[in-house]
Amino acid sequence: MPFNPQNINPDDLNPNIAIGVNLPLNGPGVFNSTYITQKAIKNNLINFFLTNPGERPLNPNFGAGLRVFLFEQSNEPTFESLNSFISSKLETFFPEVKILKLDVLSPNDEPNNVVVTLNYSINNTNINDSINVQF
């Protein structure tokens, strides 16, 4: 009997089934499709970070809403509150994503920018990945 069994999405085994939309949206038609669960989840997370609540008509609560923090003071309490805000929203919209490390900080050379780095894993799979979003 195997120890620590891992789930494999059956759609990953069929190269003819598109799972999601690839980013950026610059394909020959309108967009390119993704055929692997790992890429689809990564693109969904990037889309989540770039979306403000209210931008999706049928899902008005979806989105990280990072633009709200653009004109806040760049200091440690702001980054801590942003970190907990992002964590709670990710738990709501992506329950299958386990946050391994979430960093919110401002680069020293550009104090008006904020960089969000997310290291994550997908529950019950061997998928580990990271995202770096700058705004």
Image (spheres, rainbow, N blue to C red):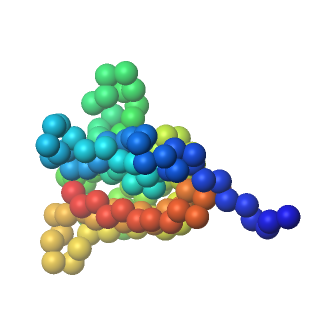
Name the residue: 60% across, 53% down.
8
Residue 113 lies left or right of residue 97; in this view the side is left
Which sits in the foreground, 110 or 36? 36
Name the residue: 24% across, 61% down.
134
Above or below: residue 107 compared with residue 123: below
Name, please, the residue furthest toward the right: 1
Locate the C terminus by quadrant.
bottom left
User: Would residue 21 be seen by someone viewing this image from the given angle?
Assistant: yes
- Total marks shown come to 0
Which sits in the foreground, 85 or 3? 3
On the image, the x and y values in percent for residue 56 come to: 31, 28
On the image, the x and y values in percent for residue 15 come to: 43, 48
Residue 58 lies left or right of residue 32; in this view the side is right
Name the residue: 40% across, 31% down.
61
Name, please, the residue furthest toward the top: 58
On the image, the x and y values in percent for residue 119 come to: 45, 66
Name the residue: 50% across, 66% down.
128
User: Would residue 48 be seen by someone viewing this image from the given angle?
Assistant: no
On the image, the x and y values in percent for residue 51 come to: 29, 41
Residue 113 lies left or right of residue 12; in this view the side is left
Which sits in the foreground, 56 or 123? 123
